């Protein structure tokens, strides 16, 4: 089951999310795990860097959720529709609130299919995407009030 089947679509299309104005870094940095468990930013980074343009926002959010729950692959496959529906039955923060563009210096490009790729803020490709007037340009949310 996809969100479109349950009446929602929270994906971005042909959009670039730039780093937050108060991002503390000038170059993309890899989030570090804390302790034995991987944090949300670590999982997001691993999934997106390992598979550029492989996930939509919804797919990424759901995959991170499933990973953090530690669901076995067979249960995830057998109950994906129910788990997806339950996960998206509550409102979810979009990737503008992700630590990747807020704290770690990564821009998020969404192609026409809504698939995401990461670009470090210091890269020429980041600048090209930030200057691309054909894309919807959004800023990541600030970490602190202005």
Image: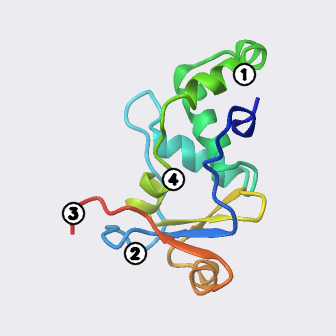
Residue 95 badge? 4
Q: Disc 4 or 3, which lies upstream in sequence? A: 4
Q: Where residue 94 sits in the image (x, y, percent)?
A: 50, 50
Where disc 4 sits, the SS reads helix
Residue under the image location 69 percent in, 32 percent down: 6
| Mark 3 crowdedness (10 Å alpha carbons): few <14, some 14-19, many ≥20 | few
Task: Give how far apart the Cα atoms at labels 3 and 1 are.
Answer: 38 Å
For the residue labelled by badge 2, is the local secondary structure a helix, a strand or a loop? loop
Q: Residue 112: where, in percent of width, then height?
A: 77, 65
Crowding at dot 1, Cα within 10 Å, few <14 / some 14-19 / many 20+, comes out as: some
- Position of residue 120 measured from the top left corner of the image (x, y, whole percent): 54, 70
How is the protein colored in the picture?
rainbow
Residue 72, relative to residue 112: is it above or below?
Answer: above
Foreground residue among 91 and 38: 91
Residue where numbered disc 1 is placed: 80
| Image quarter in which the N terminus is found | top right
Q: Tag on residue 26?
A: 2
Question: Nearer the viewer's eye, disc 4 or disc 2?
Answer: 4
Q: Are marks 3 and 2 in contact (CB under 8 Å)?
A: no
Is residue 96 depicted above or below 109 in this figure?
above
Q: Quadrant of the C terminus?
A: bottom left
């Amino acid at each position: 089951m996809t969100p479109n089947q349950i009446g929602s679509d929270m994906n971005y299309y042909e959009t670039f999310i730039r780093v937050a104005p108060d991002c503390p870094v000038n170059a993309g940095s890899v989030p570090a795990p804390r302790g034995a468990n991987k944090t949300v930013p670590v999982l997001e980074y691993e999934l997106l860097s390992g598979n550029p343009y492989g996930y939509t926002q919804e797919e990424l959010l759901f995959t991170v959720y499933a990973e953090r729950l530690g669901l076995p692959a067979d249960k995830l496959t057998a109950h994906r529709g129910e788990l997806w529906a339950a996960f998206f039955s509550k409102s979810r923060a979009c990737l503008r609130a992700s630590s990747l563009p807020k704290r770690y210096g990564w821009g998020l490009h969404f192609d026409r299919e809504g698939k995401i790729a990461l670009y470090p803020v210091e890269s020429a490709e980041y600048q090209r995407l930030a200057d691309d007037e054909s894309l919807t340009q959004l800023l990541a949310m600030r970490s602190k009030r202005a």
